[in-house]
Image (cartoon, grey):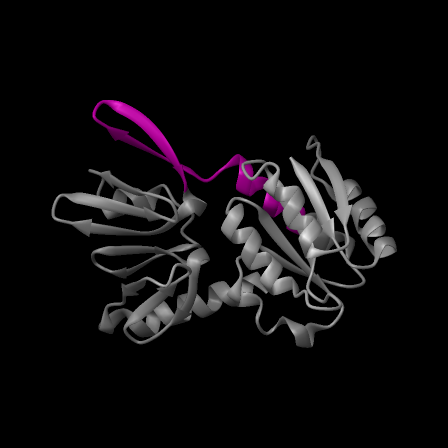
Amino acid sequence: MTILVCDDNPLHGKEIARQALQALPTGVHAAITTCVSGAQALESIQKDVEAQWIVLLDIIFPANEDGIQIAQEINRIAPHAQIIFITGDMTKCTKAGRAEYIYFLTKPIDEQDLQYALDKAVKKFSTGRLFFEQKGAGFTIRASDILYVERVGRRSYIHTRKKEYDVAEKLKAIFEQTDHYSFVFSHKSYLVNLEHVTAITPRDFVMVNQELVPISHPRYPEIKQRYMEYIRRKL
C-alpha cells in the first residue's frame, strides 16, 4: 500500500504525510511519498496502476492544474485508487462530484477525520470482492469495479469499465454480496453502483462512462433520495 500526498506547497505536503503515517489504522503499514503537481502524481501512479494507492489530493493548484481534473485522470488510469480530497477553500468543492473519491478533508486537517478517511480507504482494499461461479470455476470481482448489473432473461450481465461478465446469479443474490449503502435497484432489472453515477434524471442514472441506466418511474422519488443521501455522506 502506498500513500501519495499531492500538494503544491512542499511544506504542507510533508506535514500531511507525517499526519497520515500517524493516523494509519493499527497494524497497517504503508510507504508514503509526496509530490507538488498533478503531473508528478500521475507519473508515480502510472508506474504501477494496480498497486493499492491512497491519494491525499489538494483541490487547488496554481497555473493550469485542477485537483478535480487530476482526480478524474487518476480514476481513469487507476480505478482502484482511493482518493481523499483536501482543501482550504470549500467554495472550490462544488465540482468534486465529477470525480470519484471517498472523503473530503478541510485544512487544517482534523486528526480524527484523517483517521476515519484512511480507515475507510484501507477497508476498501481489504473487503468488497464478490464471488461467482462460471463453468465450474470460481472467480471474484471487486464491488467497486461494478458500474451496474443488468438482468436479461436467466442471465445477469455485470458491467465494469473494462469488461462485461455474464453470470447466472440473480440480482437479489448479487445485491446480498454488496455494500447496501452503495448499491441500489433503479429498476427491477438493474442494480446500480452509486459510486459510478455522475448525475440523475427522472428517467436515468448517468454513469461515469456516459451510459444511461433506466430508473423505474414509481421508484424515482425514493431512488433520488437515496442518491442525495449518498452524495451528502461523501462530502
Instruction: Determine whether 193 is above or below 78 in the image.
Output: below
Residue visible at 37% across and 63% down in the picture: 210
Residue visible at 76% across and 42% down in the picture: 33
Residue that sits furthest to the left in the current view: 153
Is 192 or 69 nearer to us in this picture?
A: 69
Is 191 or 56 nearer to us in this picture?
A: 56
- Percent position of residue 70, x then y: 61, 58
Is 7 or 108 nearer to us in this picture?
A: 7
Name the image quarter holding residue 58: bottom right
Residue range of the region highlighted in magenta in the rendering: 116-142
Instruction: Determine whether 149 is above or below 212 in the image.
Output: above
**Is residue 116 in view?**
no
Q: Is residue 173 magenta?
A: no
Give the quadrant of the C terminus. Answer: bottom right
- Percent position of residue 167, x then y: 23, 38
- Percent position of residue 2, x then y: 67, 38
**Is residue 112 in view?**
yes
Q: Is residue 141 magenta?
A: yes
